[in-house]
Structures are given as C-alpha cells and as structure tokens.
Amino acid sequence: MLEDRDIERLQGMMQGMIDASQEKLAGMLGREFLNIHAKFDGIDRKFGEVDKRFDAMDKRFDAMDQRFDAMDKRFDGVDQRLDSVEKEIKTTREELSVRLARLEEQVKQIRTRIESLEARLVDHRAEHEIFELELAGIKKMVRGVEEKKGKLDWAASQEILEAVQRRIGRLEEAVFA
C-alpha cells in the first residue's frame, strides 16, 4: 500500500506534470493567439486601405455631384433663355402678321380706287392718256410695295403707299373736278 508520503509525492509529480503541460499549452496557445492576432492586424490594415479607397471614391462622387448640380443650373438657365426667345419670336410673328394684314388692306384699298379711276376714265377720253400714264406709275409703285412686303421692308413699303395715296388723291381730284 501506498503511504501518505508516496501519495503526496505522486500528487506532486502529477501536479508538476500538469503545471508543465499547462505552461506548455499556455505557450502554444499564446503563440497561436499571437499568430491569430497578427493575422487580424493584417486584415485590419487591409480594411484600413479599403476604407481609404472608399473615402477617395466618396470624394470623387461628391465632386461629380457638384459638377452635375452645376450642369443642372446651366440647363435651367438655357431653358429659361429658350422660353424667353420663344415668347419673343411669337410676339414678333404676331406683330408681323398685323403689319402684313395692314399692308394688304392698304394695297386692296388702292387697287379698288385704281379700278374706280379706270372706270371713270372711260368717260373722259381726252384726258385718258395722261391718266393712263399716271395709273401705270401708280401700279408700278404698288408692285414695288408688294416686292418690299415680301422682303419685310416695312418702312419703305409705308412710304411708297403714302406716295401712292397722294397720287391717287390728285387723280381723283382731277377726274371728279
């Protein structure tokens, strides 16, 4: 049988073996933990690099957003200018239509007066040649107005029409006197 002393010695040996195993295990685990910790440090560094890249990309996207915002503002300005030009063109077109209608009405009135004069000239054979020459000149002026009207030369057309009106007035006075 084993005595107390032998049991204690066995316990001491076993305790020594356990302590040695624990130290050996602690050393191995410590080294493994250090290796794992080193690997995690490497992964952390890589994630840090990836974060820096994402930060740089975010800055580039912010710059692109600013550029797109600036482009949107420019497009809005162009849209406003086009709207303004469109309104101006519409207004000008309407004004030209009114002027053209006025010129056409004046030409129509002049033609009516010429036809009236021609009808009355039939009765006045003696003065016929003088009046015929005068009417030919007036007709030529009316054709000039029509040509200028096509070229949108409003001021010149208006001057010619006023001159035609005066000449017709003088003819009418001569015929009806």
Image: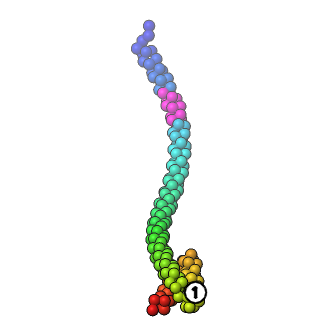
Question: Circle 1 is placed at which residue position?
Answer: 132
Compared with 155, 69 (above or below) is above
User: Could you tell me if residue 24 is visible in this image?
Assistant: yes
Which residue lies at the image location 58% right of the left edge and 80% below the top edge?
143
Specify the quadrant that holds the C terminus. bottom left
Give how far across and how far down residue 95 sits, in percent.
45, 74
- Pick the residue in front: 4 or 125: 125
Classed neighbour count for the residue bearing mark 1: other residues with Cα under 10 Å, few (<14), some (14–19), many (≥20): some
Give how far across and how far down residue 129 sits, in percent.
59, 89
Prevailing SS of the magenta stretch? helix
Q: Tell me, what colour scheme is on the image?
A: rainbow
Compared with 138, 44 (above or below) is above
Specify the quadrant that holds the N terminus. top left
- Number of numbered discs overlaid on the protein picture: 1
- Pick the residue in front: 124 or 66: 124
Q: Amino acid at mark 1?
A: Glu
Which residue lies at the image location 48% right of the left edge and 89% below the top edge?
175
User: Could you tell me if residue 160 is visible in this image?
Assistant: no
Which residue lies at the image location 54% right of the left edge and 51% below the top edge?
53
- Pick the residue in front: 107 or 34: 107
Give how far across and how far down residue 68 sits, in percent.
50, 59
- Single out the residue that lies furthest toward the top: 1
Mark 1 lies on a secondary structure that is helix
Which residue lies at the image location 53% right of the left edge and 34% below the top edge?
32
Q: Is residue 113 magenta?
A: no
- Single out the residue that lies furthest toward the left: 4
Q: Which residues are magenta?
A: 22-33
